[in-house]
Image (spheres, rainbow, N blue to C red):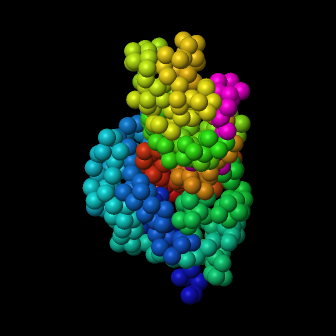
Amino acid sequence: MNNMEDTYDACVIGAGASGLVAASVLARRGFRTILIEQNKKSGRKLYATGNGRCNLANAVLSDSKYYEDPFACAVVTEESVRELHRFLSLIGITLTNRDGYLYPASMQASSVVWALTDAARLAGAEFLYDTEITAILREEPDAGAEGYLLHTAGGRSIRVSRLVLSMGSPAAEQLGAAKKPTLYRLLMDLGLPYREFQPALCPLEAEDASPEVLLCSVSAADQKALAGVRCHARLSLGSEAEEGELQLTEYGISGIVTFNLSTIAEIGDRITVDLLPDLSEREILRILRNQSGKRRLFAALNGLLHEKLCEYFLKGLFGEEGRKRALEGCTEEELTFLCHSLKHWELTITGKRGEQGQACSGGVSTEILDPATMTVTGEKRYPHLAITGELVDVVGRCGGYNLMFALISGRKAGLSV
């Protein structure tokens, strides 16, 4: 390919959600656009979103959905969401609302990937798959051509005047996500400030902290026996709380409530689990006391909790004989203690399962980005450079918020860079 063919008006690196939208908009503006992707096809992570159904947005907007991040909330506004809906409709994606979660009407992630890819391709964007960028150089005005020079692993050089970085984060590496060293190297090439990527929206490794506070005789093996249990619970970490389905695993906890707290959780923190959030301690005690005293405590408690949880807590309170203990054989103090334990089960976080996570925290600092355009501002002048999607230091809660941010940020970058 000759030098003329290696020169483009615009380049987008990364053919995920935000990159596909950015490329589509840039090409529609009349710019000769190239979209470079390290994988063999577009949207690999998108295919797996929402268990293959692609929860791509949410009907509910609030600061709490982005952990009170003012930058994210300035990007995802009611107006930008309306514009996103119009854009999706124009490229053939009709949304359906399922309890506030917005999906494509087909309920298939593949529909979204195909629509976004077709939109960019039909607008005139050129796709370059299976290509890794090894370096990005900023070309100064006095060099004769202000812009960026990209080098690929295949030895190709591409010169562009407009550049959108949409490489994503290291989350879900098994689905073709970019690797940390590659991301860090390219960001350092441009001198962009960033925060190192950390696991977010992921399961947590945890161990019972209650033996020293509430229970007395449970073991790690007992905790592993809870694996597979799902229950409605309320989890609290500091001032943050999440209520919904909790999944217990052999290593700790999972489920959406866990994922949402994992973003702010640190190793060594304690999470308090309320296993019966709809009942007070007094109400639980009354339910137990209203039953026949001849009934086993296990059977009485099993009307409220999964049997494995019943066994776990009764063993902690009464030892191996806990399952056989009759209600009439329990003192008021013991039952009160049990009720308190069920409402204040403490777990110590010992690790994060980032490889099973949906996102990462970290990325390019929002302090250098304009939320209206996603372009880089600040002391250094970066002409026509924008950052989008997961590469930005923004994390939303589960429920389509991260994909919604990616789509909106990609559209803003395409319109402004």
Verify whether residue 193 appears in magenta: no
- Compared with 157, 96 (above or below) is above
Compared with 99, 152 (above or below) is: below
Rendered image quadrant of residue 93? bottom left
Q: How many marks?
A: 0
Residue 117 at what x, y percent from top left? 39, 68
Seen from the viewer's position, the closer of residues 400 and 364 is 400
Q: Along the line of sight, which residue is nearer the eye, 152 or 158?
A: 152
* Picture quadrant of residue 213: top right
Task: Measuring from the top left, give residue 274's x and y in whole percent.
Answer: 52, 28
Asked if residue 99 shows in the view, the reply is yes
Residue 169 relative to residue 81: left or right: right
Q: Is 130 or 128 nearer to us in this picture?
A: 130
Of residues 404 and 375, the one nearer the viewer is 404
Identify the residue at image location x=31%, y=62%.
91
Which residue is at 51% across, 57% downward?
A: 417
| The residue stretch that appears in magenta | 198-219
Left or right of residue 190: residue 118: left
Q: State which quarter of the image contains the N terminus.
A: bottom right
Q: Is residue 414 visible?
A: no
Q: Is residue 292 left or right of residue 211?
A: left
Q: Position of residue 12 (x, y in %)?
A: 52, 65
Residue at the limit of the structure toward the bottom, as seen here: 1
x and y percentages locating residue 204 in the rendered image:
61, 44
Residue pictured at 33% horizontal, 41% vertical: 100
